Amino acid sequence: MTPDLLLITSSCQDGVLTFHISGQLDYDSSGQFTRYVEGALAVNRCAKTVTVDCTNLTGVDSAGLSALLSLRRRTDTAGAVLVLERRPRRLNRMLEITGTLDYLTRGNEYTAAARGGDEGNEAGHTSEQLHTTAAARTVSETEH
């Protein structure tokens, strides 16, 4: 079986730095991803939004999740917003299970509002539905 290698491309336009990733973001490729992202962020310091297009992401393990969390910390430090676009269901599920969905996708709500629309995510939920679900989860957790 041939490994599903990670391929990364990026572009920066109008203050939006976009990464297109294909393949597995895992133990074997997370270092490559982190180095690539750090280099692109260093060159594009004026980026106010960092978007990761996950359309062709075929899998993520704990090392890949760690790389995404690291990217979120870096964008926060740079004063930029992180947006994970077109997330596959399995990535959403992993983020839900690990409790990182809200943290890693908070920027998605800001950019949808800035565009004047409430675009649904890959699972067909609008940011309002996700926000309502997260709020309900928080209330439920505090009741126990």
Image (cartoon, grey):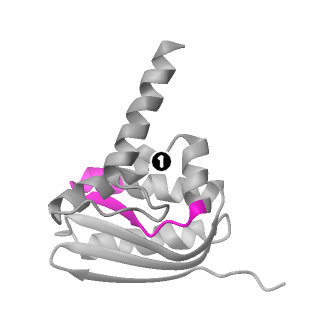
Q: Position of residue 128 (x, y in %)?
A: 31, 47
Q: Is residue 30 above or below residue 109?
A: below
Residue at the far right in the pictured view: 1
The residue at 16%/61% (across/down) is 114
Location of the C terminus by quadrant is top right
Q: Position of residue 25 (x, y in %)?
A: 60, 68
Q: Position of residue 92 (x, y in %)?
A: 54, 56
Q: Residues within 10 Å of mark 1 (few under 14, many from 20)?
A: some
The residue at 39%/76% (across/down) is 19
Could you tell me the amino acid type at mark 1?
A: Leu
Locate residue 133 relative to residue 99 in the image: left or right.
left
Locate residue 58 relative to residue 140 in the image: left or right.
right
Q: Position of residue 116 (x, y in %)?
A: 15, 63
Secondary element at image label 1? helix
Q: Quadrant of residue 14?
A: bottom left
The residue at 29%/51% (across/down) is 76
Residue 25 seen in this snapshot: no
Q: Is residue 22 above or below residue 111?
A: below
Locate residue 52 relative to residue 61 in the image: left or right.
left
Q: Identify the magenta region.
A: 74-89
Q: Is residue 91 above or below residue 54?
A: above
Is residue 137 covered in magenta? no
In depth, the one of 141 and 65 nearer the eye is 141
Is residue 79 covered in magenta? yes
In depth, the one of 137 and 73 nearer the eye is 137
In depth, the one of 116 and 100 nearer the eye is 116
Locate residue 15 relative to residue 101 in the image: left or right.
left
The residue at 45%/61% (across/down) is 124
Instruction: Find disc 1 in the rendering and name its residue.
Output: 101
